Image: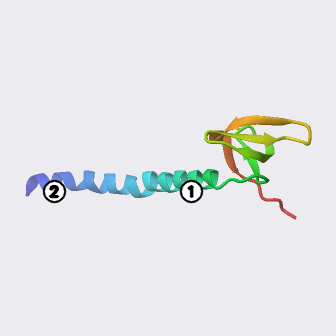
Amino acid sequence: MEIISQLLPFVFLIAIMYFVIIRPQQKEAKARKEMIDALQKGDKVITAGGIIVTVYKVEEQFLSVKINEDTTVKITKDSVIRKYEDEA
């Protein structure tokens, strides 16, 4: 009985850490992966460097993106931060 009362605060601390830190990070990572997997040609995204580009071609690990009409570059899917939604 004495051991349980001594371990109880640690169990509560671990539970709080799970629900406050670990679980939200897992949810965010899952949502980001789903967003990256759903990218299609023509979607606008923001890269880790802050550049807004248009997806030109989706490959297994890379994206070919257009910076402007003349420039197409290949980036890793991990460098995509989020989709860019035009605010009209």
Query: Percent from the top left, x then y, of residue 20?
Result: 44, 56
Query: Percent from the top left, x then y, of residue 75?
Result: 71, 36
Front-most of residues 86 and 60 = 60
Residue 35 visible to an observer of this rendering: yes
Taking the image as shown, residue 57 lies to the left or right of residue 24, namely right
* Residue at disc 1, secondary structure: helix
Badge 2 is on which residue?
Answer: 5
* Tag 2 and tag 1, C-beta contact below 8 Å: no
Q: Nearer the viewer, mark 2 or mark 1?
A: 1
Front-most of residues 17 and 88 = 88
Find residue 67 and name its label. none
Query: Percent from the top left, x then y, of residue 43?
Result: 76, 54
Taking the image as shown, residue 4 lies to the left or right of residue 76, namely left
Name the image quarter holding the N terminus: bottom left
Q: Residue furthest bottom?
A: 88
Quadrant in the rendering for residue 50? top right
Q: Residue at x 62, y 40 (%)?
A: 78
Taking the image as shown, residue 82 lies to the left or right of residue 26, namely right
4 shown above or below 50: below
* Residue at disc 2, secondary structure: helix
In 3D space, how far apart are the residues under numbered discs 2 and 1 (Cα atoms)?
39 Å
Badge 1 crowding class, 10 Å Cα cut-off, few under 14, some 14 to 19, many 20 or more, is few
Amino acid type of the residue tagged 1 in the rendering: Ala
Q: Residue at x 67, y 46 (%)?
A: 81
Residue 51 visible to an observer of this rendering: no
Front-most of residues 52 and 9 = 52
Mark positioned earlier in the residue sequence (2 or 1) = 2
Q: Residue at x 57, y 51 (%)?
A: 33
Badge 1 is on which residue?
Answer: 31
Name the image quarter holding the C terminus: bottom right
The number of discs equals 2
Amino acid type of the residue tagged 2 in the rendering: Ser
